[in-house]
Image (cartoon, rainbow, N blue to C red):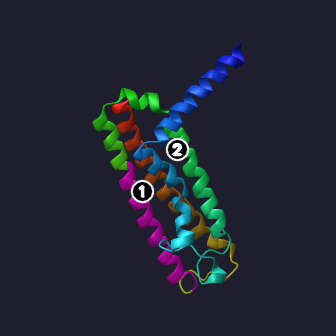
């Protein structure tokens, strides 16, 4: 009996999630899971390995995009899981949180680009980092964190706006 209740609860929640993903904002939030991969195809955000004239030596670009994609998926599920809290807030508050997420995501992108340029320009000459120097991780880990934060917070903004519209109309 208990497993039947859990199964029914799961199906109800799954249907609600699919209904949300069917909205315009939900589609955008769903697609945003794949935004980290856009750097691989579009080359807008520099993400190249050291061997390909990039800066990443210890952390590979596929590893970084995988981390960003998995964490972004977690953000979608986590945000959706907190939908009851969002229903209790007023629409203005949810939209404000979405704009804050958007702003912080842009700040993370600026941080990524700044660290990337400092690392690319001065990694060897100022910091004396050789090609396999483990100290390069002091640049690569913050780069990975900023890259991941940019995509996660952007996705969170889409999710919040989508959920505000979905539950306002629903």
Q: Position of residue 4 (x, y in %)?
A: 69, 18
Q: State yes or no: residue 82 in magenta.
A: no
Q: Which residue is mark 1?
A: 105
The answer to whether residue 93 is above or below residue 156 is above
Q: Which residue is mark 2?
A: 76
Q: Identify the residue at the far left of this view.
A: 92
At x 54%, y 53%, the residue is 33
**Residue 166 as seen in the image, left or right of residue 75:** left
| Camera-side residue of 47 and 35 | 35
Image quarter (top left, top right, bottom left or bottom right) of the C terminus:
top left
Tell me whether circle 1 and circle 2 mark residues in contact (CB < 8 Å): no
Magenta span: 101-124
Image quarter (top left, top right, bottom left or bottom right) of the N terminus:
top right
Circle 1: element type? helix
Q: Is residue 81 visible?
A: no
| Camera-side residue of 75 and 164 | 164
| Camera-side residue of 75 and 127 | 75
């Amino acid at each position: 009996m208990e497993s039947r209740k859990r199964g029914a609860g799961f199906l109800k929640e799954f249907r609600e999630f699919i209904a949300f993903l069917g909205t315009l904002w939900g589609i955008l939030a769903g697609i945003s899971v794949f935004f980290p991969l856009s750097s691989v195809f579009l080359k807008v955000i520099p993400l190249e390995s050291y061997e390909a004239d990039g800066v990443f030596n210890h952390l590979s670009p596929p590893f970084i995009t995988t981390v960003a994609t998995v964490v972004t998926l977690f953000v979608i599920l986590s945000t959706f899981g907190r939908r009851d809290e969002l229903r209790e807030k007023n629409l203005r508050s949810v939209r404000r949180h979405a704009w804050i997420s958007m702003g912080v995501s842009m700040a993370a992108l600026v941080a990524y680009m700044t660290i990337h340029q400092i690392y690319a320009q001065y990694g060897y000459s100022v910091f004396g980092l050789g090609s396999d120097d483990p100290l390069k991780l002091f640049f690569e880990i913050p780069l990975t964190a900023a890259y991941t934060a940019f995509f996660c917070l952007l996705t969170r903004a889409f999710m919040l706006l989508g959920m505000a519209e979905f539950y306002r109309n629903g």
